[in-house]
Image (cartoon, coloured by chain):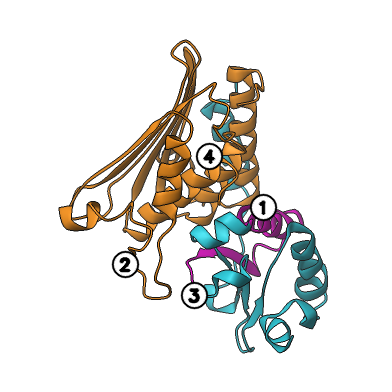
Chain colours: A orange, B cyan
Amino acid sequence: MMKEISLHILDAAENSLRAGAHLISILVWVDEKNDRLTTIITDDGVGMIEEVLLRVTDPFFTTRTTRGVGLGIPFFRYATEIAGGSFSICSEPGKGTKVEAFFSLSHIDRMPLGDINSTIETLILCHPDKDFFYTYRYNESSFELDTRSFRSILLDIPLYEPEISTFIKEYLRENKSEIDGDATI
Amino acid sequence: MKTLEELKEIRDKMQSQVSMRKEDHARTRILVGMATCGIASGARPVLQTLSNLVQEHHMTDRFTVIQTGCNGLCQYEPIVEILEPGKEKIIYVKMTPEKAEEVFQEHFVKGQVLEHYTLASADAQ
């Protein structure tokens, strides 16, 4: 079982990568006024046909051959449902997949968001050939990290070069902290 | 607020340095299992520890940290596989950030395999 929502986000993004996605968009939105925490992961991967889509929240369904169970999506869904939220996944073959998880922010059983910066950092630095568009929104303020705009500045310098990866880490840390004042979420 | 202006400055500084990268086939690849089983058992901090250490010690020209999927050994996660060209694959199991740091110091820096953390030794028990 995952201990943080940010680990579920990482797990969902790993699914997108395995689906051959080139661009993965991740939104994390903390909305205190409406007591809601929203996370949306959208990819441009191969997508799923309806028959598969209907079964992805079934723990005994997986497309893997290395093991017979697939717990990632069922766990993610369960995490939302025990916390007064909801979960949805829509997909279209050839277009991509969108995973939406809504949590009731103040619900006692909502797991913490956790180290979301580590999730984003890990995804970007270990997949230098993929693009990520991350938006972190805290009430009315937000910031974005779009690897496409990073790349247009860096040209042939890879994102995993130490100077750049340090910049990415600081960019995430400083901007998040400025927006949410390091609130415990 | 950090902005992309700063990134431009970094780029300008870096472009003046000619990068000497080793060819990919000469590098050691470090594979960290990042499927649901790996992530749930704590693979993210293990991966971060390894990639931070490789960067801090300026060893990115010799080691590449890569994510991989699940190979069916879920009970042994987090798993770290070391693929060094010309050598047998080493599989470290049940990793933690602390063990990963040890692997870095002993294996990556000194070339000494930590047998007691490997799959072979876990299987023997």
Residue under label 3: B72
Task: Kindly identify the amino acid type of the residue bearing the numbered disc 2.
Answer: Thr
> Mark 4 to mark 1: distance in Å?
15 Å
Q: Which kind of residue does numbered mark 1 sit on?
A: Pro
Q: Is residue B53 magenta?
A: yes
Residue position marked by numbered label 1 in the rendering: B45
- The answer to which of B52 and A69 lies nearer the viewer is A69
Circle 4 residues within 10 Å: few <14, some 14–19, many ≥20: many
Rendered view: A123 above or below A88: below
Q: Chain of mark 4?
A: A
Region in magenta? B42-70
Decide which of B53, A117 is in the foreground and name it: A117
> How far is disc 3 from disc 2 in space, using C-alphas?
13 Å
| Residue under numbered circle 4 | A5
Label 1: few (<14), some (14–19) or many (≥20) C-alpha neighbours in 10 Å:
some
For label 2, the SS is: loop
Q: CA distance from mark 3 to mark 4?
A: 24 Å
4 and 2 marks on the same chain? yes
Q: Are marks 3 and 2 on the same chain?
A: no
Q: Chain of mark 2?
A: A
Nearer to the camera, A167 or B96:
B96
